[in-house]
Image (cartoon, rainbow, N blue to C red):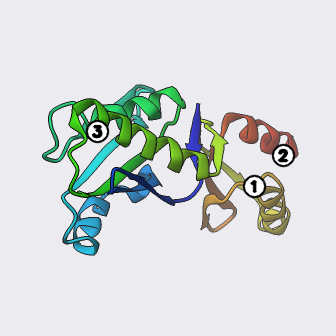
Amino acid sequence: MKCVKSAVINTTEMNRSKFIAHLVPISEYEGFQEKLRQEHPKANHVVYALRYMNDFDQIVENSSDDGEPKGCAGVPALNVLRGETLINCAVLIVRYFGGIKLGTGGMARAYALAVKNVVCEAVLETYEKEVVHMFETAYSEVERTLYRLKQLRITKFERNFGSSAVEWTIMASEEKIKLLSRTYK
């Protein structure tokens, strides 16, 4: 499975209709549809599809046609995300009607093409499940620990400076946690 590193935008035109696709990490999805509606007040539709991993290691999927004929917009977009094995991302497509009706098949192809085009532009990385790991170090080990975290590209961490030691809480892949644990054995 793959996930999106950062947001990407791509515009696809079909029969004078314009499809502006936004591929974003799932963390940026909340409220993004409303933001797009405000940015594009004359757009006819803002369709979305999303896939993410929940706390029970299950893939959750959802899509919306946003007023387009049922199954002609959100489902084709979701199918592209499935086919590309993308996870923890959402795609939102802003559609401006160009005056020529596409029909249900043409519309489904147009939305799928818009998603394929934006995925081609995206920087993808391999999905790794992250877990929380806690450990303690002496105050004299703080700089060494920060250096090791940087080496392993672990950026999600918190420190709690206690009376006798520093408590660390990190979030990283199990592989990175194993490599970090070897440092302190």
Q: Nearer the viewer, mark 2 or mark 1?
A: 1
Q: Quadrant of residue 58?
A: top left
Q: Secondary structure at mark 3?
A: helix
User: On the rendered structure, is 118 left or right of 177?
Assistant: left
Specify whether residue 1 is in view.
yes
Q: Nearer the viewer, mark 2 or mark 3?
A: 3
Marks 3 and 1: in contact by CB < 8 Å?
no
Q: Secondary structure at mark 1?
A: loop
The residue carrying mark 1 is 153
Q: Residues within 10 Å of mark 3 (few under 14, many from 20)?
A: many
Amino acid type at image mark 2: Tyr
Question: Between disc 1 and disc 3, whose residue precedes?
Answer: 3
Percent x, y of residue 61: 33, 32
Marks 1 and 2: in contact by CB < 8 Å?
no
Work out which quarter of the rendered image holds the N terminus and state it. Answer: top right
Q: Residues within 10 Å of mark 1 (few under 14, many from 20)?
A: few
Q: Nearer the viewer, mark 1 or mark 3?
A: 3
Work out which quarter of the rendered image holds the C terminus and state it. Answer: top right
Amino acid type at image mark 1: Arg
Q: Secondary structure at mark 2?
A: loop
Q: CA distance from mark 2 to mark 1?
A: 17 Å
Amino acid type at image mark 3: Met
Q: CA distance from mark 1 to mark 3?
A: 42 Å
The residue carrying mark 2 is 184
Question: Between disc 2 and disc 3, whose residue precedes?
Answer: 3
The residue carrying mark 3 is 107
